[in-house]
Amino acid sequence: MVLRVNFERSDDVAVLLCKGRLVRGHDLDLLRECLTNLDHVRVIVLDLAEVEMIDAGALGVLVFLHHWTMSNGIQLKIVNPSPLVHEMFVRTRLNCVLDISSLEEALEILAPPSHSPMRYAAVC
């Protein structure tokens, strides 16, 4: 299965639901280009719940996006990684680098401050 991405945007938050194979190639290049060309965005949420395969090329792109968003004052949130993707994050220790959370945690973070208790990231 090729990579399919559903894109939604609300004000300064972009949400991308990725489905299929997140692997090196044209689709991954398009995803990186799409994200780096977003204007006036404060938060990018990548929902990886339906990603069935991820390779080293995709992990490299996620690290690139992590650095790119940090240097541009954008928050990159990775939510709901599938069990395989989560295992890859743990094995490569990217779970200590990337902001990974459940969808519920991400929604709490994105809620207005008066509706969300303060949370701190776990230390790896």
Image (cartoon, helix red, strand yellow):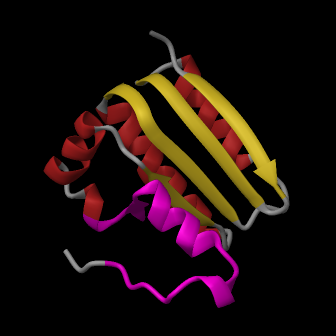
Residue at 61% from the left image edge and 33% from the top image edge? 31
Above or below, 60 against 24 in this view is below
Up-down relation of residue 26 to residue 89 (above or below): above
Q: Residue furthest front?
A: 115
Residue 87: image location, x then y, percent: 19, 43
Residue at the left extreme of this rendering: 91
Apparent side of residue 62 relative to residue 38 in the rendered image (left or right) = left
Say whether residue 35 is left or right of residue 120.
right
Residue 97 colored in magenta in the image: yes
Give the residue at x 26% y 46%.
86
Task: Give 33 or 84, whichever is nearer the viewer.
Answer: 84
Q: Which residues are magenta?
A: 96-121
From the viewer's perspective, is residue 79 above or below residue 31? below
Would you say residue 37 sits in the magenta stretch?
A: no
State whether residue 67 appears in this view.
Answer: no
**Residue nearest the observer in this picture, 91 or 25:** 91
* Point 66% across, 48% down: residue: 15
Q: Percent from the top left, x then y, of residue 43?
A: 66, 63
User: Is residue 115 at least partly visible in the picture?
Assistant: yes
Q: Is residue 2 left or right of residue 12?
A: left
How many marks do you count on the picture? 0
